Amino acid sequence: MIKQQLTEKLEEIIGKYAKEKGIENFVFSVEEPPKNIAADFAVNAAMLIAKKIKANPRNIAAEIIDLILSGMGDIINKADIAGAGFINLHLKDEVLFDELKKIVSEKDKYGSKASNNKEKIMVEFVSANPTGPLHIGHGRGAAIGDSLARILKHLGYNTTKEYYLNDVGNQMLVLAESARVRYLQLMGDEVPFPADHYQGDYIKDIAKRLVDEGRNIDEIDFKKEAVKDILATIEIDLKDFAVEFDNWFSEGAIALDQDKNGKTEVDKACEYLVSKGDAYVKDDALWLASTKFGDDKDRVLKRSDGRYTYLASDVAYHKNKFERGFTKLVNLWGADHHGYVARINACVQMLGFPKEALKVVLYQLVSLVRNGQPVAMSTRTGEFITLKEVVDEVGKDACRFFFLLRAPDSQLEFDLELAKKQSSENPVFYVQYVNARCNSIFRESKSRTDITKNADFSLLNTKEERALIKQLTAFCDTLSLCEKTMSPHHFTSYLIELADIYHKFYEKCRVLSDDSALTSARLKLIEAVCVIIKNGLGLLGVSTPEKM
């Protein structure tokens, strides 16, 4: 939280200075300087102001430094000018030590904000059609969505995880027919299996269960039976992946279930849009006037033959979410849905909510690599690589961590062999090993010294110790960055960097020594490391073993 608080104070001081120079709404950056610069933060404000008013940036920097030192003396130890006018800031050690104390006292509550609880957020993710097992693309969406929800909950938001079950439509008819044909084949009928139907062995397993149960074809609802079996498999695979949903929402509840007047929620949502002038009839079809809110063309809600489109169900579903009291909706979709974003944004605004009430996170699919060679994956042929197969091979922890190594909109290459390595080459092992190494030190310390409650942090004065403390205190800033970008991948980067810094500390600074005061301070420091590693990996759904 130090960077965020520092930035807010700088914005106040420098913003006022810029305004006096005739610059309104001045924006600048506060960043960490390159590793070879001995400073905590660097500010580019002086150069930007100088360019606007045609002044010497170093002169501007000197004036800003005077204001910073007089207004932030409780935080800043010193400030100096670098290069063409960068302002380098050095924090007071006490600021870092105070944050360190918060970490060890607040533990798993560190970074949480009770004030956020008034906002009710729904994170809807995976939502794969129940037509087969989850593949690795679904797995990436599951890792991103679940980790993002964990982060939002940690930040204090009232967060719900929901799976939208697409159990209505043509793909369900194809699924039912696929199961029916396999059932007939098992019963001895020589009926051909359509090439465009679901080919996987899981369809045969559904049919075999029905045959083994002695079910008569006339009494079987093949759609219901297929969905039941596939959904059970999906739930198990997700649970093994450390993903559990708060709610499973059936499309049938809004598209098929009728009220006492014979109307579905889809009917009522479309009627609502018509009443507001946001939907209209043309050529016997019902159209959404989505161009009013930035879409490139209007979209069909109801075809001329009376059948609703998927968009109509989505309008009703989002209306239902808001009616349940959610104030912020986060949807995770595969990148192939990018063209759908504008029309859903339009729908949200037509329902009377601000565009900001919906955030759509698009994620790219995953390419698997083994021994440097790509692993092929298809879909309906039944030859795809399932999430379960990857989890069984590399483990849940490695699978989740690797899925989160890149931003959602970045291509991800998943190296199966690397994910299985028990070495520092494997990033999840590298991070987990920090926790194991710290706990090993604690086990050894019990026979030598105790952690005192009043550890003297001022003894932690090497550059390695300071770097470690500073990285620990960046935990809350990483939380804020994940919230701002709606992406948990910043935590994998943060934890890998923390592991780098810790291992350098471990090599240079002996924790257990004859100096009891220094030993006590360093033990308290690695206690903070354990807190942050456990919190960080926990937000990613990854375990923290104490022995490796």
Image (cartoon, helix red, strand yellow):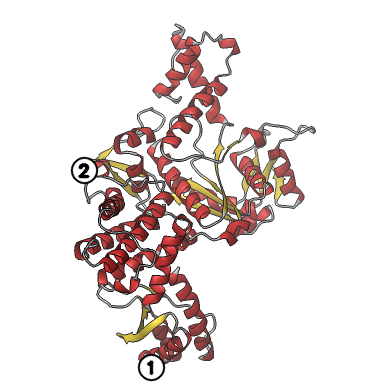
Q: Position of residue 475 (x, y in %)?
A: 41, 62
| Label 2, label 1: how far apart the Cα atoms are | 55 Å
Near mark 1 (Cα within 10 A), the count class, few <14, some 14-19 or many ≥20, is: some
Residue 49 percent coordinates (x, y): 44, 86
Q: Amino acid at mark 2?
A: Gly
From this viewpoint, is residue 494 visible? no
Q: Which residue is mark 2?
A: 372
Look at the picture and state if 482 lies above or below 38: above
Going by the image, does 322 lie left or right of 536? right
Q: Is the C-beta separation of discs 2 and 1 under 8 Å? A: no
- Dot 2 lies on which element? loop
Identify which amino acid the numbered label 1 is placed on. Answer: Asn
Which is more foreground, mark 2 or mark 1? 1
Near-viewer residue (337 or 328): 328
For disc 1, the marked residue is 59
First along the sequence among labels 2 and 1: 1
